[in-house]
Amino acid sequence: MELYDYQKSMLKQTILQFKNHNKILWQLATSGGKTFTFSNLVQYWIEKYHCKAIILCHREELVHQAIESLNQMGITCESVMPRNKVLKHTSQVYVGMIETCYRRLQSNPYFFQNVGLVISDEAHVQVFDKIYSHFPSAKILGVTATPVVMKRIKFYKCKYCKTDYENQEVCCDDMTDEWTKPFAMSSTYENIVVGPTIDKLIEKGSLVKELPFAKKYVDLDSLKTGSDGEITTESFDSAYSNEDAVFNVLLNYNELCKGKKTIIFNGSSKNNKMVYEKFLEAGLNVRMYDSVNVELSGNRKQLVDWFNKEDDAILLNVGCFVAGFNSKEVQAIILNVATNSLSQFIQMCGRGARATDKIYKDHFILVDGGGNIDRHLEFSDPTRDWKEIFFNGLGKPKAKKQDAFDIESCEDCGALYAKSEPSCPECGNIILPPIKQIKEVEFDENILTPIRKIPPPNANKIYEYTIRKGENINFAFKIMIAQYVDLFKFYRVTKETYEATLANGNLEKDVRLIIRKCYFLFISKPDIRTEGKRSIKYLVEKTLEKIKEYYYI
């Protein structure tokens, strides 16, 4: 395999930056080829400096992926898993689980030999930096699609001169105030090398664009954030684990995703089981996985094998199939979860974004039931500035709320008082708490709606896919018809509207217009033509027949 130009550029930048820095971070989006790219860096490093490398992972799947990639390049590997108590030291690269490697080094600082390069896969997971001190002479490379950590750091600021301090000090004759700021990965790594944006990888064909559907169908205002910055399981269960919300997941699956290979991300094990039981009752091809419902989850490897083989498989999970899960035929992602983590959001979406030629896949369906697109922008949004996020974190510094010193004016006498006071200290007026507006929760059982225009069938893309599959013009016509019928489903065209446009002739005119655009391109391509020739009239009738089936069968 040859490196793409952007991969070559990232390697060149990294090698140059390592001349002045010891710790570098890579940002490379899903399907950017990060494993293959850092495998080439490993090959360069061990050949140039005659040393070993160690690759650290936090999931077993990532260990296997790294070993497979390195072996394909002729690089020998030794895995470091819990069962490996002693190493042979005969291979060029160690590939291991971070916690296992850390425990071995705690017991024996010389457990690894001659390591000159350390690579941390999925570096945004804050478990790797504790091991770096064990390799003081090695170069460190962190690799991630999302260089952002959902954590805030406490510091102190003078209210007068605005000087920052790590600890509380006296400044300008007064105590400094407590503030928090977003954690930045630049506190661990010295510089960043940024890869192409998601939309550029879509243009290149490595990813497919999302077809997003979003609607607020639970009371997201009731969700609470814990000390880790993430939404609490308790508040999630309260909002999502009721009959109406679970029913909406099933309803949206049936209307938007039915028959497609689908991953559903749920927010808790309780909710995961409830959704599973609903889908099971509906007779769907569904399985579930989480760390609590072990009796229903079964063996993870067998589950993945089943999912890869079944075209209409539905896999429910609670954040278990986010990183290192590479089934490229996933056609739909349902987010039955709300997350504050940009990394989590992008990785969940990324499970559906991988391109493939095994099926016709020019997009994937993204059903967002958790307000995540509102929080984090669309998956393929090109405006994210990863360099800015790397150096400054995501978010703004905030002063700690000091309720005891929040000042208010008494309505009776005008005296100032702290909001925490039960009554005005001057006139004794009792301070009544503000009336809390109770918002009635309305569960909207409508299907989620597309948040941007859905394009009609793309003749060029269908033709290119037909060529790659070695098929003929009739195969292209089938895809064209199926994609046109999908527009009625995605735009939620009512049966009444369908019947009205059919009766007044507008539907047939629209169908004919779309088909003509595709038809003349297809018949102009000698490499897909057949002896028999379908007419436009036949294709229009076939399309109208399929639309009718959607409404009446």
Image (cartoon, rainbow, N blue to C red):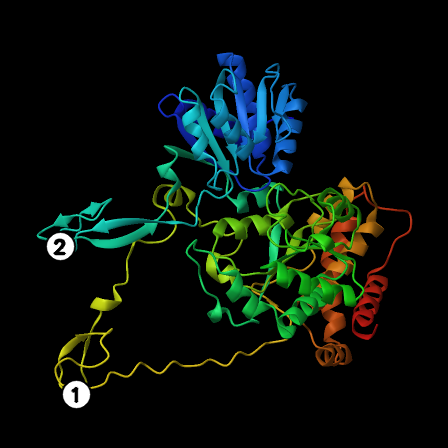
Mark 2 residue crowding within 10 angstroms, few (<14) / some (14–19) / many (20+): few
Earlier sequence position, callout 2 versus callout 1:
2
- Near-viewer residue (66 or 389): 66
Q: Is residue 487 visible?
A: no
Q: Residue furthest right?
A: 532
Q: Which of the image's four quarters has the N terminus?
A: top right
- Near-viewer residue (332 or 200): 332
Specify the amino acid type for callout 1. Answer: Asp
Side of 212 relative to 389 (left or right): right
- Which residue is painted at 84% across and 67% down in the image? 541
Residue 155 percent coordinates (x, y)? 27, 48
The residue carrying mark 1 is 412
- Which residue is painted at 71% across and 57% down in the image? 517
Side of 96 relative to 225 (left or right): right
Q: Does 470 appear above or below 47?
A: below
Q: Does 217 appear above or below 73?
A: below
Mark 1 residue crowding within 10 angstroms, few (<14) / some (14–19) / many (20+): few
- Near-viewer residue (403 or 85): 85
Q: Which mark is residue 160?
A: 2
Q: Which mark is residue 354?
A: none
Q: Kindly state the secondary structure of the residue where label 2 is placed.
A: loop
- Which residue is painted at 70% across and 43% down in the image? 356
Dot 2 and dot 1 residues touching (CB under 8 Å): no
Residue 445 percent coordinates (x, y)? 63, 75
Specify the amino acid type for callout 2. Answer: Tyr
Q: Residue furthest left?
A: 173
